[in-house]
Structure formats: C-alpha cells, structure tokens
Image (tube, rainbow, N blue to C red):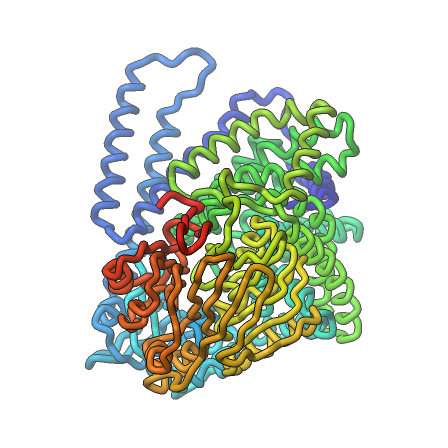
Amino acid sequence: MSEPLVRRAGAALAARLRPRRSQREPETDVVRDLRVVPLALAAWAAAWAGTGGSPRLALLGLAGVGLAAAAAVLRRRRVRPRPGRPRGGAWLVATVLVALVVGGLGAVQAHRLRSGPPARLAAAGAVVDARLELVGDARRVDGAPGRPPVLVADGRLLELTGRGGRWRVRVPVTVLVSGEEVGWWAAQPVGTSVVVPGRLQSPDPGDDVAAVLRVRAPPTAVFPPGAGGRLVERVRAGLRAAVADRPAEPRALVPALVLGDTSGITAELRGVFQTTGLTHLTAVSGANLTLLLAFLLLGARWSGVRGWWLRGVGLLGVAVFVALCRTEPSVLRAAAMGLVALAALGAGGRRAGLRNLGVAMLGLLLVEPFLARSWGFALSVLASGGIIWWARPWADVLARWLPRLLAESVTLPLAAHLTTLPVVVLLSGRVSVVGLLANALAGPFVGPATVLGFAAAGASLVSAPAAALLGRGAAWSAQAIVTVARVGARLPGADVGWPAGPAAVLVLAAGCLLAALLVPWVLARRLPTVLLALALVVALVRVPSVPGWPPPGWRLVVCDVGQGDGLVLRAGPGSAVVVDAGPEPDRMRRCLDALGVREVPLLVLTHFHADHADGLPGVLAGRAVRQVWVSPLAEPAAEVASVRAAAAAEGAAVVVPVPGARVRVGEVALRVVGPLPPRGGDGDPSGVQNDASVVLVADVGGLGVLLPGDVEPPGQRALLTAGVDLRATVLKVPHHGSSRQEPAFFAATGARLAVASAGQDNDYGHPAARTVELARSLGMTVLSTDRVGSVAVTGTDADPRVVTQRPP
C-alpha cells in the first residue's frame, strides 16, 4: 500500500473494471456507503465482547443493546422524516442484528473452546495422547537465560485420548516443544499430522485456542501433508533456495516479505525495523497482495484478458497468495485488506473505500470473531482506513507544487503512520520519529522485492537458475530496505519514549487527529512544509533530551534495558566503562546516546547470557570500543561465538580478567574480585553460568559501586569465604533481584543504595519482594528500573544523590 506506481495502476484498472454509475444516481446512495462503517464497528465491539470468555454476560449485554436500539427505532417512527432524507431505522436495526449475530458467534466459539473436553483436561493438567495437524510454521522462542529455546507451533487438535476417555474434536491448540525434540519439530512442514504424548495446560485468558500442549517425547505416528501441502512447501523451499547465496539479512527478509516466513529474521533485525516503523515489512500484510494483484492484472490486461476473465485472474491471485502464505487468520486479514486497498485505489473515492473496508471487516469477523482481540487486525484496519480517507486528498494538495510520485510517497506513509501511532505506542511505549522518512525511502523497493520474490517462488518449480536470477533481484531490493532501516535506526532521534498508559495514549491520539486536520493546510504551502521537514531532520540527528536527564555530574547510570543489565560508569567527557549490554541493542544504544557516550575504552560482559550480551551491537553502534572483558566460562556457545565475532569486527581485544587485577580507566578505578570457586551449587547449567559472572568493585570519582553480575548464593558465599572486601555505597542487586540471595553478602556490602535492573511485568517476578525486604532491612534505599526507568547516581560516598527518569 506504500507503492505509488501500484496505486496508479490499480486506479486505472479499477476505473475500467467498475460498472458505470448513472449520472442521475442520487447522492444519497453514495452517502449510505458510509453507514457500513458504524455497522462494522458495532460488529467489532460485539465480537470483542462475545469472545471475552463470559458468553452469558456477553449475550445479556448484546440483548440489552438490541432492546435499547429497538426502543430507539420505535421512537423514531413517531417522528415524520424530513423530505429527501432516508430513514435510519432500518439501518439501525440491521446494525443491531449484525452485532447480535457476530457477538453470538464469538460467544459460541469462546464457549466451545473453554468448555469442551480439551479445555477440561487442560484445567486438570492431564497427560494425553493427541493427534494433531500442524497449521502454522514453528517459531523458536528463547527461554530463560541459560535455558534451551522452546519451539512454538500452531496446531489443530483432531483426536484426544486421556483420563479414560477418547474424543474426536477439531479445535486450535498451541504446541510447545522443548528438549531434544525441538530440531525434529522445526523441520516438519505445515500439514503434517502426528500422534504424540504430552501434557495439556490452560491457555491465557483471551487466547483463541482451546489448550496448550507441552510435548517432550517423540511422536508415535507421523502422517505427511497431502499433495497440496507438499506443493506449497516445495514453492516456499524454492524461494528460500533462490536467495540462499545472498547476504544473511536480505536472505531472511525476502521470504518474510513475500510469504510471511519469518524464521530467518533475528531479534536484532526485528528491533531495527520496529525502531524505524518498518515492522509491517517483516511479515505478510495487505500491501503484499495489493502489489501482487496489481502486477497480475496489469500483465493480464496487456495480454488481452478482459471482462470476467480479468476478475478471475484477480481471484486466482488471491487464492495463490492465501495458499502460499498459509490459511492463517493473519493471512486472511491481509488478503481482505489488500483487496480493499486495490478496490479503493480508483473506485468511489473515500466513501466507496470505507464501504469496502467495512464489508471486509464484517466478513473477517464473521469467519474469525477472535480477530476482534488481535492487535494486528486493529493495525490493519486503522492503516487501511487512514490511507483511504486521508492519503489521496493530501496527495492532491501536495501535488500542486511537488511531482505526483513524490507527493504520494510522502502522504501514504504519513496517513498510515498517524492512524496507527496510538496503537503502536500502546504496544511498544515508543514513538518512531524516523518512521515517516523510512517508509517513504523504503517504499519504492517494496514493490520490486515482493513481485520478484513471488516470481522467484513460482519459477523455482520450473527452473532453479531462473529462480536464482529473480531471487537476486528481490534480494537487491530487500537489501535496500534493510539499509534504510539500519541507517534510520542509528539516528540519535530515531524514536522517543512515550507512556503507554490510557491517559497518555488518549492525549497522543488527540494530537494525531489534530495533526491530521492541520496536514492539508501545511502541505498546501511550501514554507510551512519545508520548515516542518527541517524540524524533522533536526529531531533525527539530535539526541532527544528528557528534561533533567541526564543529571549534571552523573557518575553511574543503571540503564533501563528491560529484563537485563546495562550499566555505565563515567570515565570522562564522552567516555565511559560499560558493564553489560542488556538484551536489546536499541535500548542500550539509546541510553548511551542520551548520556553522550562516544567512546568505550572498556566493555565488561559479566557472563554470556542473552540478557547481558545480546545488546552488544547497541554499544558498538557509532562508538569506539577498545577492549572487552568476558567471563572465564565460555557458555552458552552460541552467545560466546556472537560476542567474539562482534568484537573482532570492531578490532576490540577480548580478555578474561583475573581476580585480584586492578585497572584504571579515566575516572574509574576497577578491582576484579570474582568469580571464585565453587561455582553453582546444584549442577544447574544456568546457575553455574551465573556464578561465573565477573564481579567488580568500582570507584567512580569517589563513589563506590559493587557490580556482582548474576552471582547466586553459592558464588556469593565463595566471595564471603575468601574474605573479599565488598564494601560499596551502591549495590547493583545480583540477578535482577532474584529471590535467591545470601543475606550475609548484602550485609557485607554496607551499601546505602540498592538498584535492581529488571523489565516491566517480567515473568520472573523480579525484583522479588523477599529481596527488596532484605535490602531495606539493612537500611538500603531500593530502586528498580521497571518502576522508575534508568537510575543515575551523582556525588560521592560522602553525599550520594539519585535521579530517576520516572517518578518513583
């Protein structure tokens, strides 16, 4: 939907395909098109209520709405309508009926999922033998630090045996695979049926599955997919093979952009796309189908195809798109929104476009009521609605003094950005400042990457060399998109934080609406438009500053990096020692940028867990790093290899520090006190790796800081037994405030301030209430980044002071 050339081609096709409207057709017929919008919104609200897990209350609420609407209709009938104005009673009744039907379907489906045999067995945690069919590609999800990954797959439960019963069912389930079976399941194509033992668990409230099936044993029977499934998998594998010799990032992006195959997209690359507002390009969206249909219809028309045959080509394109991208709710949503976008490009303007959007919403909600609870559905609807309602008139205004192609390149992403921004902030707590520019620059490359990717996938059935040639073209375009995303993400002002609370999001939504009302006035005038563009450039190249942050004279900053560690010790102007890099590069980069750190003479990675090392690219971005200290225990192996490769690329030496070593880096004096044996007390691999953390005592301009990494009680006791001097004014709480702490270790520090680095609403319960109470009982002031954001400490041991990004 961000491709102006496709927009123009679609407009021309739509103008030729649509039936001619009589010039004497009353204007009221066009106005009525807008009435589909409140009908669709009512259906959306009803589906949300019906799928809420309480069918009786939902149905009672919908019945109340119906009675109230019926009473309103009766009152309207007593009033004589004005001449020329259509009656609204019939449409109101239709809206209520649609809401009752959609809400009722949602309630019935929710009841079916929550009360059937799978749900009852899941509530009891029963061990069962299940026959299921894989309906979606498996996804690897990283477990807790030091734990192996878990595989998550979407399945359809067909038969269930357990607790003395046997049932034939047909309900969706989420499959979780751990242990040695992960590799086997990851290689299975969609459509494979298996019989496997596992344990059922109840899903989270609001999930559109009947149960969660945990699998730890190999399947007892395997049935391959049918002929159609094998053909689809062959095409998907053909596209992957066509780009197999390309660089890693375009090799991963092309299958994601074309077929929704995100298996190659790394968490770091996904974060870059999120920062630049390009996340929609890492998965299937309505834009993909719009581009594919425009290409197919143009080619068919040039080949002489006309009339209903041309419509047949479009329907065939939709069917192929859905088959290749899987018949999942997200793909069906993308197909519907893509058809809406193509139909709205030239037929009927804003009102006809919104009519088509409303019809698509109704169709999707009737087929899958649980879409009403999907953030992806909300983003698709808002983006499509914004483009339909605003993009064309804005482009018409801007095209008065700019080329049409450039005008559309600006107004299309601007319309989508403004309409979706409140929801994006609600999900991420960030506002992408560079999103508009990044979408405008990446837009021209989306079409070639998508069309050439589809062509490569089809050609792989006939000729591997032809597919490779087309895949090379798709990869070149994808590389341009990646370059735009990476350059945009490195800009200091790429995105800014915004509170995700209801009041703050409402304020942002009101601001977006006001901005949308002012956009035509601004775009119609050159000077305001140029000034606004210059202001955007200044905001991007300058680090956005929060009032009062960072405080002058800061010595230590515990960065809010989520569920992980990232600390900065001031070594001098623009220079710092960084201890750990957090789990996400972008959050660590933003913290260092805000502090003005341009040089890192020493980076310490206390151990190799992802929540301490995965943010390493954020430290390296635009900064000189001379030396990297690491743990003596080189595990997990994958993280070790990643760290060493990144350090080698930057020319930084990797060193294992020895306990007892002392070093001074500018204003920072470091003393290495750990790790000391024994490490780990129960043989748990994660605990052993935690106790192998590098432990430091730092003096930062007269401020004492103890940095123990993630050492657990065995490692803490080893330090106490060795008689190590642990005294400091500030204690970085070990292991993010885990409940497993040694009270004598805390007491030996004599600290006045304890800071825990933990993520908001983390699954571990960090910092634990028990640990917080322990620190407070010793007279420490306790702060946690999940509640106050980043924490800065100024002053010295004699007079330490604390400044937080958010009020405690």
Query: In the rendered view, does 545 fall on the left or right side of 768?
Result: right
Residue 308 placement, left or right of 658? right
Vertical position of residue 222 compared to residue 374: above or below? below
Q: Position of residue 651 (x, y in %)?
A: 71, 71
Give left or right: position of 723 versus 23. Answer: left
Residue 239: give x, y in percent of width and height.
67, 70
Residue 505: x, y in percent?
43, 38
Residue 528 pos. (x, y %)? 69, 25
Q: Is 631 or 801 nearer to us in this picture?
A: 801
Does residue 335 appear anywhere in the picture? Answer: yes
Q: Is residue 193 visible?
A: no
Above or below residue 675? Residue 375 is above
Q: Nearer the viewer, residue 689 or 186?
A: 689
Image quarter (top left, top right, bottom left or bottom right) of the N terminus: top right
Write the residue at 39% across / 42% down: 501
Side of 731 relative to 19 (left or right): left
Q: Nearer the viewer, residue 642 or 323?
A: 642
Question: With respect to residue 618, does 233 lie above or below?
Answer: below
